[in-house]
Image: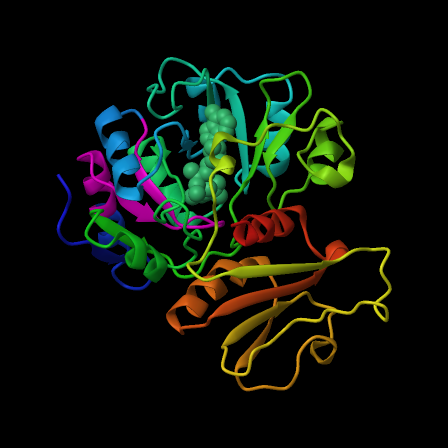
Amino acid sequence: MTPSETVLLPGTGPHREEALDRAVCLLLEGELVAFPTETVYGLGALATAADAVARVFVAKGRPSDNPLIVHLASPREIDLYARPGPVVSELAAAFMPGPLTLVLPSRQSIPAIVRAGLPSVALRIPDHPLALELLERTGPLVAPSANRSGRPSPTRASHVVDDLDGRIAAVLDGGSCRVGIESTVLDLCSRTPRILRPGTISAADIAAVIGPVATADPRSGDQSAAPPAPGMKYRHYAPAIPVELHLLEEVEGEEGFDLKIDFKADESVLLLLSEQFEPEKVVPESDRVAVRRLDEESLFTRFREAEKEGVDRIVVVARRRELSEGMLNRLQKAAAS
Ligand code: TXA
Ligand code: MG
């Protein structure tokens, strides 16, 4: 049954404990509750209740072949749901809780629907006090990003309401998410660990702890480049307005970089520039062009605000070397039509 009204629960301030109690009760009853993590808001449901998990796919409009991440309160629980290999304890010590998801051989305790039938399961310990308190009280929760499938991930409670109002029981409001893009997904089922989805924890960060890591990054020249996570084949992170990406490669000197962006007089544009870019090099002065800086924390919020403000086009101009792997990936996905 689809709940008719979505309740907003205040996760900060004097009613925090009541809000948490209510969120826990709803989840234990098999309802869907969105909650904040350090990356983006997740849409929570009991990971061991196949019927609750089925409702997550319906609420998001998510294809059933796209598996979900199971969130845990502590790395000590990993062994209950997966068969950890030798490097897991090192990764846990370095990055957990934090924005890293590990794909490991699953145990039977995880229903097949969570894994979209795969033999592996994705596990993550979020670094957010509200998420951790919830997880301690409910046990493992699936939590895909709490957006309608294909939309930018939500980094504020209001984004979740915009996408899922009337389709889920509640949203636990914890304010803005600190990281802003989704976790790095690392596959540990093959011989060489492979990054399936880049995030703020980079390939180099992981390699410093466990040695060589394969990536799907074409710049790495890695021929064993990973097929992306099942979810990465879908158009993603995209606002309802066109996103145009202009990347300045290392070899091009700034002087020689001629953008030729065609700004129409009657068009409203959001121009996102990487940190070291001078706006004057790109944009004619116009009150129809809003110039903002690119950063991970605000990227999806900017996309969603531009939609609401009736912007016609989002133009991104960035030096490639200024972008993290995660940022480059999200921009390329958003710009792909
Ligand atoms: O930061 C995050 O990871 C957020 C927060 C809420 O924790 N969650 C999130 O979940 O981004 P979702 O469902 O939007 O993305 C999960 C990604 C998808 O690309 C999915 O295909 C992949 O992880 N994935 C999940 N289980 C997998 C598995 N067993 N093997 C390979 N990829 C998997
Ligand atoms: Mg998602």
- Along the line of sight, which residue is nearer the eye, 139 or 167? 167
From the viewer's perspective, tell me whether residue 96 is left or right of residue 30: right
Residue 162 appearing in the image: yes
**In the rendered view of the protein, which quadrant contains the N terminus?**
top left
From the viewer's perspective, tell me whether residue 167 is left or right of residue 312: left
Residue bounds of the magenta highlight: 22-47
Give the image location of residue 18, x and y in percent. Answer: 22, 53
Give the image location of residue 337, x and y in percent. Answer: 51, 50
Could you tell me which residue is drawn at 51 percent across and 37 percent down? 232
Determine the image quadrant of residue 241: bottom left
Color style of the picture: rainbow
Give the number of marks.
Answer: 0
- Along the line of sight, which residue is nearer the eye, 302 or 204? 302
Give the image location of residue 323, x and y in percent. Answer: 69, 55
Relative to 249, residue 46 above or below: above
96 in the magenta segment: no
Give the image location of residue 16, x and y in percent. Answer: 29, 57
31 in the magenta segment: yes
Relative to 3, residue 124 above or below: above
- Along the line of sight, which residue is nearer the eye, 27 or 133? 27
